[in-house]
Image: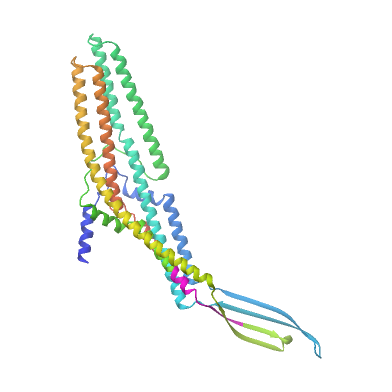
Amino acid sequence: MNAMRTLALALALAFAAPAHAGHLPDPKAAEAAMLESATVMQARGDLAAQGLRSQGLQHGFEEWTVGAELAQRRIQTVPRDNEGEWAVSVARAVRLPARAAADRALAGARIAYAEANLGEAVHESGRRLLTLWFDWLAEAGQAPLWEEQLATAARQLEVVESRIRLGEAPRAERVNAEAALAQVRLQQQQAATRAQQVRARLRAEYPALAVAFDGVLPAPQAPQGDADAYADAVLAHNHELARARRHADVLQAETRQLAQRRGVDPSVGVFYRNEAGGDERVLGLNLGLTLPGAARRFEEQAAAQSSTTAQLAAQRIEQRLRTEARADFETARAQVGNWQRADQAAQALDEAARLAARAYSLGEGSLDQVLLTQRLALEGRLQARLAQVGALAADARLKLDTHQLWALDVAVEMEGQHP
């Protein structure tokens, strides 16, 4: 037990996230937005409905049967007579203790599955929110770069005009500089349009979420620990795996319930008869037995087969999730390295563009070389920014899957407080 507590503490420290990072949505707002998503609302409704069905299963479906009879007795012997007769009866099927226990076990298994399904819906909603958020961040994060590039292109046009006035450059260079400035304006507008489109998709799915960005992105940090420890942390919280296991439990409980239903179905009732025109009155007790047919045996066998298949599927899901978790961890680490190299390349390209512009302002080099280096520098900064956003997104995904980013279990625990 101490070893397990030590491991849990180590994982919590290794994958802990700050309370709120500026490039991420507010945790409380994100949790509220996830709970209001369509998939989570559907899962919560399914859990509530399953709770009601399970209560019915716990009470049992054996019901009262009320019967009535009317008859006319005709006596052919002397003295001939016609006498009215009637009877009433009430009976109820009896649920044996073993069958009642199987029904209660099935009810509990179905609620557990519905809770796991809700947990997976919340988790998937969180993943979807992160995907849309970083899609928007990748576009919105380019705005400062385009503003800077627009200012650079405008300054370059001023330098060209100054050289033309001094007779140091042909007038044709003004056309090239103006074309470069116009192209930057167009690309800036296109980037702004893409950002608006992605933001609209984010707001459409999560309307309660405040979408804002201050333009500052932190430096991505490589994940600590190793891939195996991270995979263990993921599987300890994975709702998809929990849902697969709970589904197998439901099918296993159904198998046990159907096994109990292969026995006879007894029923007990009472009846009252008024016969011979009221001269004879009969009060009695009746007992019925419904004998099961072959269909019940086949249903039990089918449920057993489905249960075995579901257990094997849960094992395959666990293997897949472990492999994917390791791959996600290694990918997150690699993306930090990719951003570092892209950032270094962008800095080098920026320096080359600065030197080319400086040389042109001093009467050396050509405008074409300046525009080329500026374009390459912009592409380098854009690539570095995308690599930075990608690394931050991978890190956020790691923390989300280990439940270190947002409280993904709160809704499930609250919904699970059923009677």
Q: Quadrant of residue 215?
A: top left
Front-most of residues 281 and 373? 373
The percent position of residue 244, horizontal first and vertical second, equals 38, 59
The C terminus sits in image quarter: bottom left
Drawn side of residue 269 relative to residue 371, left or right = right
The N terminus sits in image quarter: bottom left
Q: Quadrant of residue 155?
A: top left
The percent position of residue 301, horizontal first and vertical second, equals 46, 68
Front-most of residues 348 and 300? 300
**How many numbered discs, if any?**
0
User: Is any atom of residue 370 visible in this view?
Assistant: yes
Where is 388 relative to 235, above or below? above
Drawn side of residue 156 relative to residue 264, left or right = left
Q: Residue at the bottom extreme? A: 78
Q: Which residues are magenta?
A: 254-270
The percent position of residue 407, horizontal first and vertical second, equals 32, 54
Where is 378 relative to 282, above or below? above
The percent position of residue 85, horizontal first and vertical second, equals 72, 82
